[in-house]
Image (cartoon, helix red, strand yellow):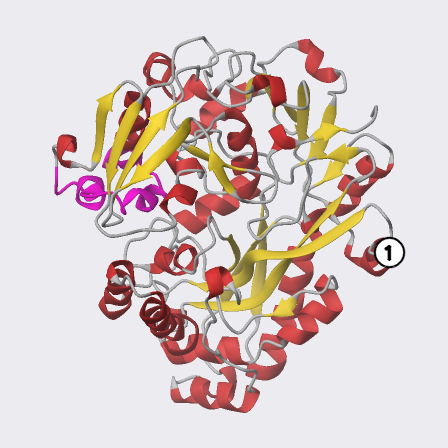
């Protein structure tokens, strides 16, 4: 239903969107949606973070700072947060932002009929999960209580030190429910959307640009740097870099928008900026497909991938091959060792599973999203599987929106995937693979794994908690292997640091648009 609405968005927005904005950046794929409850991708998340603001926010260094909540208190047992909202916080139509807006939006996000893939991020709240699963009907029993217009009390099932950071992510943003009720799916259109962040939606032209304008009702609008921003949906690296080189864009935000064959040369330029962050490029196996029901087959595929070759030959920006799914150092966590390349063991496992030399293995397709980097990796994997296992796979490229839908519906055999941590803790990587998790997208369902993640949530001792996570991660990448990590991300941006301020390297790859400003004239 949303797709039909999206097709009309190109007709909306005002003509001045054809003029160059004060700041223009290349955002990758065309956004799938701007509804915070439904967003699953990073390009959409960047725009939502400019349009909406949660109880907390991220600064340019990825640190959690007060957002709509100017302060909060924590109970001695670490389970009850009391958020005190700013009384000068306003929606873009002038309405006050209240504690009820957060409570009622969280109810919408958790409601089964919303089908929000990220609803599990609210499961830390007492009774959030049973309400989302439909076993609890009375939302008043969920631990989000309005004490008054400016005070929200949140009760968690267990002490959750990263909860303030979670409040800065899209699933916990508030939306203006009267607007949603008035316009239905069309509430995200220009002219309809009411938002509470530093920017408003001025125009959204499909395959052209999303135009943001400064929100005069934002509580901190005096410190918002850019008056107008254009986000260009360009996913091909050569096209993106030509836009940037010609001065039609001020910032390239992603590594995927950098021409691979020029990486060595481009990395020497003064406008090249690179730093590691908590992100992993990996493969998902669809366990509901006959070809990948057997863990031995999944492990065999993983064991023949030459990850060092991929980072040296294709990515070429200092990425590290990944044995684990969680990048080392997340909140001090050190992951367990994973599967090392071993083609002989892979062939043995494949034969044991009934496919000696790849004989009689069904035809499978590797799904990937648009972009030269993804395509180059897909071709290399195809060659590795054929050479080492005797298995020929076909390749299927889809544009971003269709790709996300295919992943969500398990309409694939094996697929490229990526995950960037929402907060600095291994939980943001590992809890997504519990049975029925909104971002699981593999069909993996293991009660032992689910129990480990639940046990970690209840564990107060950090060392014991990390030990439990290591047990879960061994199951995820070495034993059951519903995924295969390939490499850890390195963030790459192109911009003139002498002129553009508000950019800083950080582990969450957070670069809030409202923090950016011109040091000198553009």
Residue 518 in picture, x, y percent from top left: 76, 27
Residue 503 in picture, x, y percent from top left: 69, 40
What residue is drawn where x is 59% and y is 66%? 487
* Looking at the image, residue 341 lies above or below residue 274: below
Q: Is residue 325 left or right of residue 440?
A: right
Closest to the observer: 463 or 259? Answer: 463
* Looking at the image, residue 425 lies above or below residue 187: below
Q: Is residue 463 left or right of residue 260?
A: left
What is the quadrant of residue 495 in the picture? Answer: top right
* Looking at the image, residue 225 lies above or below residue 302: above
The residue wearing badge 1 is: 268
What is the quadrant of residue 176 in the picture? Answer: top left
Identify the residue at the far front of this view: 76
Residue 433 in picture, x, y percent from top left: 35, 59
Q: Answer yes or no: is residue 223 visible.
A: yes
Residue 238 in picture, x, y percent from top left: 79, 45
Within 10 Å of disc 1 (Cα), the crowding (few <14, some 14-19, many 20+) is few
Q: Secondary structure at mark 1?
A: loop
Question: In the rendered image, which quarter contains the N terminus?
Answer: top left
Q: Is residue 120 magenta?
A: yes
Q: Is residue 229 magenta?
A: no
What residue is drawn where x is 80% and y is 42%? 241
Total marks shown come to 1
Question: In the rendered image, which quarter contains the C terminus?
Answer: top right
**Residues rendered magenta in the picture:** 109-136
* Looking at the image, residue 222 lies above or below residue 508: above
Closest to the observer: 225 or 285? Answer: 225
Q: Answer yes or no: is residue 202 visible.
A: no
What residue is drawn where x is 30% and y is 59%? 434
């Amino acid at each position: 239903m949303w797709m039909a609405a999206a097709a009309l968005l190109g007709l909306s927005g005002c003509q001045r969107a054809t003029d160059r904005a004060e700041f223009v950046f290349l955002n990758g794929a065309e956004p799938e949606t701007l509804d915070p409850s439904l967003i699953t991708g990073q390009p959409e998340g960047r725009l939502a973070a400019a349009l909406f603001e949660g109880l907390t926010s991220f600064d340019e260094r990825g640190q959690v700072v007060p957002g709509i909540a100017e302060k909060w208190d924590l109970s001695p047992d670490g389970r009850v947060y009391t958020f005190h909202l700013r009384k000068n916080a306003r929606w873009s139509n002038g309405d006050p932002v209240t504690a009820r807006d957060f409570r009622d939006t969280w109810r919408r996000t958790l409601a089964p009929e919303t089908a929000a893939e990220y609803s599990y991020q609210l499961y830390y709240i007492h009774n959030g999960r049973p309400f989302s699963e439909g076993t609890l009907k009375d939302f008043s029993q969920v631990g989000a209580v309005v004490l008054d217009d400016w005070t929200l009390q949140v009760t968690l099932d267990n002490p959750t030190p990263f909860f303030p950071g979670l409040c800065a992510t899209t699933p916990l943003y508030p939306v203006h429910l009267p607007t949603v009720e008035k316009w239905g799916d069309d509430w995200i259109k220009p002219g309809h959307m009411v938002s509470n962040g530093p920017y408003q939606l001025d125009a959204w032209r499909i395959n052209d640009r999303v135009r943001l304008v400064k929100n005069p009702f934002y509580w901190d609008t005096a410190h918002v740097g850019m008056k107008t921003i254009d986000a260009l949906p360009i996913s091909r690296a050569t096209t993106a870099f030509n836009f940037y080189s010609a001065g039609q864009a001020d910032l390239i935000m992603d590594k995927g928008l950098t021409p691979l064959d020029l990486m060595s040369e481009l990395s020497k330029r003064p406008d090249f900026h690179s730093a590691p962050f908590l992100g992993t490029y990996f493969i998902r196996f669809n366990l509901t497909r006959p070809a990948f029901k057997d863990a031995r087959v999944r492990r065999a595929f993983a064991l023949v991938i030459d990850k060092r070759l991929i980072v040296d030959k294709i990515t070429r920006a200092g990425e590290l091959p990944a044995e684990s799914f969680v990048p080392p150092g997340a909140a001090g966590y050190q992951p367990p060792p994973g599967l090392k390349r071993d083609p002989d063991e892979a062939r043995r496992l494949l034969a044991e599973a009934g496919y000696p030399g790849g004989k009689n293995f069904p035809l499978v397709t590797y799904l990937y999203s648009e972009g030269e980097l993804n395509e180059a990796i897909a071709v290399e994997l195809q060659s590795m599987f054929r050479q080492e296992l005797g298995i020929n796979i076909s390749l299927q490229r889809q544009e971003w929106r269709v790709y996300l839908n295919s992943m969500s519906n398990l309409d694939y055999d094996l697929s490229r995937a990526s995950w960037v941590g929402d907060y600095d803790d291994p939980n943001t990587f590992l809890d997504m693979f519990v049975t029925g998790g909104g971002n699981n997208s593999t069909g993996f369902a293991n009660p032992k794994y689910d129990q480990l993640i639940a046990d970690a949530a209840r564990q107060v001792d950090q060392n014991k908690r990390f030990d439990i996570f290591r047990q879960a991660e061994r199951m995820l990448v070495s034993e059951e292997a519903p995924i295969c990590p390939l490499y850890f991300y390195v963030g790459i941006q192109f911009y003139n640091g002498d002129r553009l301020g508000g950019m800083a390297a950080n582990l969450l790859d957070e670069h809030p648009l409202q923090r950016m400003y011109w040091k000198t004239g553009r």
